[in-house]
Amino acid sequence: AQTVTQSQPEMSVQEAETVTLSCTYDTSESNYYLFWYKQPPSRQMILVIRQEAYKQQNATENRFSVNFQKAAKSFSLKISDSQLGDTAMYFCAFISYNFNKFYFGSGTKLNVKP
Amino acid sequence: DVKVTQSSRYLVKRTGEKVFLECVQDMDHENMFWYRQDPGLGLRLIYFSYDVKMKEKGDIPEGYSVSREKKERFSLILESASTNQTSMYLCASTLGAPKAEAFFGQGTRLTVV
């Protein structure tokens, strides 16, 4: 079974600074996808960024980027120039290419302070 | 835009009641999922369905069942609600790989008293 581990239950960052959220996963699959989702207080899950395992290049979306280390099974999210609106729960998620089960980590609560 | 709609945002039920949580998606997605979300535990998969009338157990199926009679609708059933089923329930849908992104409903906060 696949597992996803987020070891930081809660983090804080000052507005405009950079923060990195950690995620590790365990799988025997070679092809898969990794995601970071954001859940603000409204509870609506929002996709932040996606990484295909077969792509060596790290994904970026504006202020959000990932550090994908396939051999280490590590997938961290870096948020640059943090904004108050980034305050939310962040979930790391895994899905195998050949299966359609999504597995999620336990989440990291990010507080962006003014 | 893909829309995933859950029938209730908040629900209060009594112990022993049969509870139905409904989820509807409007983008012809094959795969649909039910998760429960609890603090410190993240999202745990209860059941998923990859086609009409097809379902598979997730990690915590005990006390739950599901129904998918039409492609757009996936129902989660609590056969006899118990207080330990008080939780946030999230429904999601997705196309198959490679477009594997999941789209979520707004969640149902269920309280069993």
Image (cartoon, coloured by chain):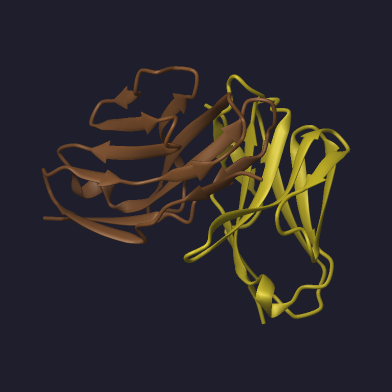
Residue at x 63% of width, y 72% of height? B86
Quarter of the image where the C terminus of chain B is located: bottom right
- Determine if residue A77 is in view: yes
Residue at x 11% of width, y 55% of height? A114
Residue A17 lies left or right of residue B43; in this view the side is left
Q: How many marks?
A: 0
Residue A7 lies left or right of residue B95; in this view the side is left
Answer with the quarter of the image where residue A109 lies.
bottom left
- Rendering coords of residue A41 (x, y %): 38, 56
Residue at x 35% of width, y 23% of height? A59
Residue A60 lies left or right of residue B109; in this view the side is left
- Determine if residue A41 is in view: no
Q: Which chain is brown?
A: A
Residue A81 lies left or right of residue B70; in this view the side is left
| Depth check, front residue: A47 or A41 | A47
- Rendering coords of residue A8 (x, y %): 34, 57
| Depth check, front residue: B61 or A69 | A69
* A110 to B99, vertically: above or below: below
Residue at x 48% of width, y 56% of height? A106
- Rendering coords of residue B89 (x, y %): 62, 57
* B24 to B17, vertically: above or below: above
| Depth check, front residue: B38 or A71 | A71
- Rendering coords of residue A84 (x, y %): 20, 49
Q: Which chain is yellow?
A: B
